[in-house]
Amino acid sequence: MVPAKQLLSTIESTLLGPSPPTPAQRIELMHAIHNSFSSFQSLLSYPPPKPSDRAQVQSKQVRLPDSSPISLDDQDVHIALKLSDDLYLNEIDCVSLIVSANQEWGLLGREPLEILRLASGLWYTERRNLLTALYTLLRAVVLDQGLEVDLVSDIQKYLEDLISAGLRQRLISLIKELNREEPAGQGGPHSELYVLDSRGALVERRAVVCRERLIIGHCLVLSILVVRISPKDVKDIFSELKDTAAELSGTAATLKQQITFSLLFSLVISFVSDALSAVPDKASILSCDVSFRHEFQEIVIAHGNDPNVEGFVDCIRLAWAVHLMLLQDGTVSSALSTDLKNICACLEVIFTNNVFQFLLDRILRSAAYHNDDEDMVYMYNAYLHKLITCFLSHPLARDKVKEAKDKAMSVLSPYRSGSHDRVHEGNLNSQQAIEPASLPFVSLLEFVSEIYQKEPELLAGNDVLWTFVNFAGEDHTSFQTLVAFLKMLSTLASSQEGASRVFDMLQSRTFRSVGWSTLFECLSIYEEKFKRSLQAAGAMLPEIQEGDAKALVGYLTVLQKVMEHGNPIERKNWFPDIEPFFKLLSYENVPPYLKGALRNTITTFIQVSPIFKDTIWSYLEQYDLPVVVGTNIGNSSQPMAAQIYDMRFELNEIEARRERYPSTLSFLNLLNALIAEERDVSDRGRRFIGVFRFIYDDVFGPFQQRAYADPYEKWQLIVACLQHFQMMLSMYDIKDEDIDSVFDQSQLSAVAQSAQLQMQLPVVELMKDFMSGKTVFRNIMSILTRGVNAIITERTTQVYGQLLEKAVQLSLEILILVFEKDVIVSDFWRPLYQPLDIILSQDHNQIVAFLEYVRYDFRPQIQQCSIRIMSILSSRMVELVQLLLKSNAANCLIEDYAACLELRSEECQIIENSREDSGILIMQLLIDNISRPAPNLTQLLLKFDLDTPIERTVLQPRFHYSCLKVILDMLDQYIKPDVNALLHEFGFQLLYELCLDPVTSGPTMDLLSSKKYHFFVKHLVTVGVAPLPKRNNTQALRISSLHQRAWLLKLLATELHACDISGSLHREACQSILAHIFGKDIIEDGIHSSTLQNGDEDSGAGSMSKSKVLELLEVVRFKSPDTYPKFSEAVRNLKYVSLVEGIIGNPTTSEKGGIYYYSERGDRLIDLASFRDKLWQKFNLISPQLGSFASEAELGEVRETIQHLLRWGWKYNKNLEEQAAQLHMLTGWSQIVEVTVSRRMSSFPNRSEILFQVLDVSLSTSASPDCSMKMAVILTQVALTCMAKLRDERFLCPIGLDSDSFTFLDMLMMKQLPNGACHSILFKLIMAILRQESSEALRRRYSQYALLLSYFQYSQNMVDPDVPTSVLKSLLLSEQEGEDLDLQKIHKEQAELARANFSIFRKEAQAVLDVVIKDATQGSESGKTVSLFVLDALICIDHDRFILNQLQSRGFLRSCFIRISNFSSQDGGRSLDSLQRACTLEAELVLLLRISHKYGKLGAQVLFSMGVLEHTSSCKAVNIHVKGSLMRVETKLGRDVAMDIDRQRMIVAPILRIVLSLTSLVDTSEFFEVKNKIVREVIDFVKGHQLLFDQILRENIPKAEDLTLEEINLVVGILCKIWPYEESDEYGFVQGLFGMMCALFPRDSENQRKSELKVFQLCFSLSSYLYFLVTKKFLRLQVSDVSTGYNVQQQPTLALLGSLLNSVTATLERACEEKSLLLNKIQDMNELSRQEVDEIISMCSRKECVSSSDNIQKRRYIAMMEMCQVAGNKDQLITLLLPLAENVLNILLIHLQDEETVEMITHGAKSDLEQDLPWLCGKLVPILERLELLSEDKTGHNLKVFRRLVNSLKELAIQNLAL
């Protein structure tokens, strides 16, 4: 058995959906209803209580079907037994109800009574769903819903079987049973009176049961049209009808009346349909049973005592008589005579009791009938049409009607004269009008009118009715019958065919005394009488006879309908002269109701032709009553002396006495209709100020104090006034000049006030009224503050209910218009006038009153207005939530908004305009308020706990009924995805925004992560990877589907990014998301774990043949629709298209005169209504004759053009929305990929494989021709992230090892992609770069360039670059296992990959270089920079100097040199552009340096031959650096310092590197060749930048930063390389170098550990220079510095070198020991404890790399990597110190070996030699002995030559000591 809720959902989605059902839906439907056959057959029949089950419940152990035993507590037992007693339900089923209620609502913490009501409400909801399902099936068969014939046939066959099985008898008995005062019905005397419905609202049980009876009654009516009724059923229904009708006496309960109507029409339809369906071979079922006919005749003809029951029985008598009339043919003579007698008997009673009047008063004109189900009312009217048609077609009936007509003519007087105060002068549509004693003929005419007034289409082809019209229109001697006949004619003219026929009938004088001529003659006669009386002195105005007045009203009503519904072409010529309708308006003796009819008739001509509008204005000014308020109506400036009284007088003196206001009402309607057609708003409504003041002061202002004979007319007046106010506010805007229009008028004179009155603007006066709480505001508040419950009651019980509803809607719309305008002037009009929200806040009950209209579900527009006002107030009133809480309205509003949203989600038809969708408005309201200060409206409506900090809320949507519950259920069930597409979309967006907001993110993410919802992963299949709807006929659904996926993916990305995985809840949620998206197992703490435990989810993740992350990308891999604003060929061929381009080109919105608007998603779309208006305006300017005198052909051409353009605009909008949706989803996809890659990738064991898949598909998609440029940017960014992660991934800690042990060998177990995969990446990346370019493509290409650079970095480092090769070699020497780990093999593989990369590039080299070089020369500065870096990377992989040759042959290098030399001082400014230009210069210098490095001396020779030194010398950047440094000293501004350092890094250092690279061309063998060109040019460069070199050499080395030390090294390297070739030292560089030696050589190595590597590099350069001088220039040094003069040049001494050697020796010893210790620790890593490992990490200052949750395996990896880096640094230091020591040793050795040197040192003073040289040797010997102790194992170098040198020096030193 299918649950009732699921059954109803299946039926509605299949039968009521916006599109035809699919085969799958049809199969599902038939399967569901066949499984529910027994439920329908025994409708609402449930197992009764049983003693055994009661005992089981009392035992507190209950076994439910298909479940294990459950335990109950005392409260559960009490509630279950109470439910059983109250509902007459089995005790076990009551326990099931409690369980279901707990699942639905969560019962923990609720009171027993609340649980009882919730369970009861759940039971009644199931019943209601089952009844609604049955009604929907019956409705699908009976009504033509456009379903497929075979589907309807299948359902009909099913229903026939169901009815044959006893369904109809069950329906009849249920109507009776449910009306009883017993537990199975409305409840016993001790039953609980209330239940809680599905939204948690308290509802009276009787009302619920009564609604069930009504649905059953409707089902009964429809079932009769499926299977004809049986005689027994007829008698049962008739009996129940009498019982039900008896209950109506003295009550106006709407539902009970509607139930009675359903029973009545069940019989009416039964009799009519049974007789009409009788054919020769298939007789009437009822006629076959002779005994039934006899018995029922006796029953139906019997008289009763209850007049109310008798009225309904009379209706049955009429239907029974018609049934007998239809069955007369084919019956035997005896039966015929009996039937005739029965018919005559019935007719006699029918006409005697005047059943037609009863049908009118008690049924057709009742509020209950008007408010019944629309489909049922249509069925009722259709069969009343058949009933009356059959009735009037029978001779007996016609005779009876003729008899009634004759009687009416004889009884009623021809006319009645006298005062109109004594007769009916009200609105003829009034349902409470007092008429003379109604006669059957008059009632019959009105009955026919009432039937076809509601359904005019039933008139088509109804010859019987037109025959009756001809009969009824003849020989009227009474105005009552004439008026009734004319009223019937007006109804018959309610269709185009009927209007034409009635017009012709009255035009051709079909009736002797009835015709259009009679109307106009009568008007002319009375107009002449009034004229003559005015011309005669002292004569009284004549009275219009009542009969004439009523007849005129009847004629005018017919004319009105004829003109409303007539053919638009023909009706223009029907009444060309409308002046007669105006001539009686100004006379006092004309009855107000006649004036009302005249004005109503005039109003109909406004829509006939634009010509009539101007004509009507002119005639009104000439004839109608004035409204004197400073000016006359319209444009007339002449006073109307002939008019003796105005509208005020007529309203207040004439109509007010009679308490009827037809003249005023028609006046307002006419003026409103005219104003609505005005297109010229230039005067801003000033000419309507008279009408406005009349309505403001006299009609609407005192409306509450007036007396009204008819409340229907009262609300008509109110609606007319409100419509006028709404037009004034919507048509006219507030402008700047209105700001100064506010001042105190009390001090003005009467004349000045009158003049000021003439200058008033209606819109300004209305704004003043509302912003000061005056008349209109108070009256509107009096309407709204009646309360939504009172409005609902009056709407359903009163005939004027729909007018009251309209008044409420207009009032709310006016408030919204005021809200839109008051902010413009509120700041200027204070303090006299305040914004509307301030005025409203003075009485909180007002705010609550109109916010509660969200509960009003009869008219969606009222709900929408209430929601919009809530949105406005929430943005203006910070205290709104507190106000609602204090007024105790918050809980009701929470439920009302949830109910409104839920009701919208259950709709079956798509709402095209989302701005008219209540559900969308609520969702936007919730989204807009999320970020507002807490407590805000979103938090209130979603049921956050406002009594505690919002962040600590524990959301319980199943416990509290709120919008959150509705949204979660809606997304969870995902029903009606086509109808609710936008709701689903905004639901996902709302949850995303909640998770993003810092206040609500915690509670929301906790809720969504809970196992109760599985929200994050559930929709990946249902929404994420579901097939995308086609564009052809479901483009809107396709767009919304893309946005849904986008918000879902962004929601998942937020959870992955922001959640705290230390908690199990979010950790499991993240693991589930990752497992579903990437289709892989998750690893946590080194252990594989699948987090999806249940079967469905596990299978969903494990059986994926394709990763969902790739499937999600497949969804958006389609060609974006064209959104370029161009016209199609069909549109371009039209005549006026060139004029439209100006409209399209205006970018402003419709509010500012343009045609664009921003949708709820933020897309800028064409407002089709504004577009249409602009088009018409444009065409009217071009061809002014279009408005009045255009031919139909011209108008048709314009209309066709506009239709074409509107279709184009609609398509443009949809395509733009789809493109935005595509980009949105791709953005969501990119976010979840990038978050996963950057933050959660460590959870996967095969990370490289996943990264490659995503990278590969991203590149493939971006290279596709269908991929737009915007998409390619996003995809390239994703690929860049994946490439960067791949590059880092190879050297991360390996995951998934079997133990916690970790060796250095694991560092080489890198996850390098196969070469084929690398080749694929490079090839696709090249293809993406070579896509057709555009300006946008350039920006995108820069990301591709970055990706290309990242790829080259990835492919060039197969071993972790942070682990030095020397360290790996040292470690590998101690491990002789694993030939695969041989470094030589690794280097070989890397070389192979490099060659392959170049081979792939070579195939597209020309095209790639074209693109890159073009970007490097013509792109923006940032583009140039990146392009130069790409060329740098290409040079790195170059073979056979291919790239170099290309750059030379294309002239690119020459252009680089020119740009370098042209770098001006302006480019060195401090602007962003200057900084970008400096970055470009740096990139150019780096490229040149790369050429020199890559190609060695050849590259340097190429650069030198192209004049690199000349161009760099011309570059102003170096001078800027010097000036900038001076400025830095002067200003000492941090910003300047930072910019100078950046410029130093970007420009100076690269130039110095290039110059240093050129010194490699200096051939030392040409030392004495002073003409060496390279040497001379470098020396010239140095001389040309003397300030720069001096400045760098003077830097304080101990305090210098790393960048400064590098520059010092570069300068010293250049000088040491080329300055020995300079003969003179006029620039002082030699002395500077010597001074630097004196400063550095005696350094303390322990005090400069941080920068010791760079300082020793500097020492090495200086020692090399000194060694050069000693060996080539035979410089000899003193042992120590003994000079005291100031002019003696400072030189280094041998003692200084000894001190340097000592420092080098100490550093060597320390570095060797530390390196050895580190290597030993690396090898013994697995033996270290966690504390020791953490100490190592802390020592290396890498605590940020480790979290508390990281296991020992990862900690050991980090510690090992850090130690490898430190060991590498030590090895690098050792490698530098050994040659430095050799230089020092060689210099000392030369001095001690050379006797001449010794003599020169001593200067011939033996005492000095004896004193200094032995002292020096004594210092050297211990140092040399320490150097001898250095081992090759610890240094990692061959020390044979080094030791030989040490030994030689040591021997000489010992010899000198012995001297």
Image: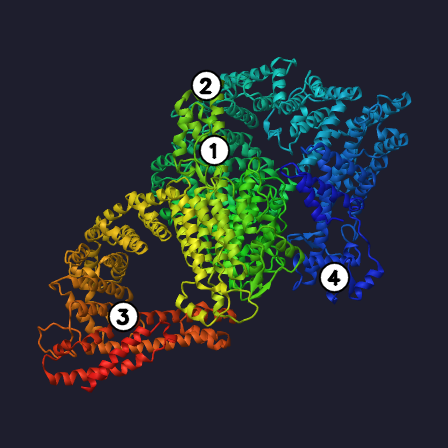
Residue 215: x and y in percent read: 73, 42
The label on residue 1209 is: 1
Task: Find disc 4 in the rendering and name its residue.
Answer: 79
Asked which secondary structure carries label 4, the reply is helix
Q: Quadrant of residue 953?
A: bottom right
Task: Find disc 3 in the rendering and name its residue.
Answer: 1655
Q: As rendered, which of 126 and 362 lies closer to the eye?
A: 126
Q: Quadrant of residue 35?
A: top right
- Whichever of labels 4 and 3 marks the residue nearer the N terminus, that label is 4
Q: Residues within 10 Å of mark 1 (few under 14, many from 20)?
A: many
Q: As rendered, which of 271 and 713 lies closer to the eye?
A: 271
Q: Amino acid at mark 3?
A: Val
- Whichever of labels 1 and 2 marks the residue nearer the N terminus, that label is 2
Q: Amino acid at mark 2?
A: Ala
What's the residue at 43%, 72% (across, down)?
Answer: 1737
The label on residue 532 is: none
Asked which secondary structure carries label 1, the reply is helix
- Whichever of labels 4 and 1 marks the residue nearer the N terminus, that label is 4
Nearer the camera: disc 1 or disc 2: 1
- Whichever of labels 2 and 4 marks the residue nearer the N terminus, that label is 4
Residue 1793: x and y in percent read: 19, 77
Q: Is residue 638 above or below residue 1374?
A: above
Q: Amino acid at mark 1?
A: Gly
Per the model, the C-alpha gap separating discs 1 and 3 is 72 Å
Q: Amino acid at mark 4?
A: Ile
Relative side of 274 to 1163, left or right: right
Per the model, the C-alpha gap separating discs 2 and 4 is 78 Å
Q: Is residue 572 above or below residue 1235?
A: above
Task: Find disc 2 in the rendering and name its residue.
Answer: 1190
Per the model, the C-alpha gap separating discs 4 and 1 is 62 Å
Nearer the camera: disc 4 or disc 3: 3
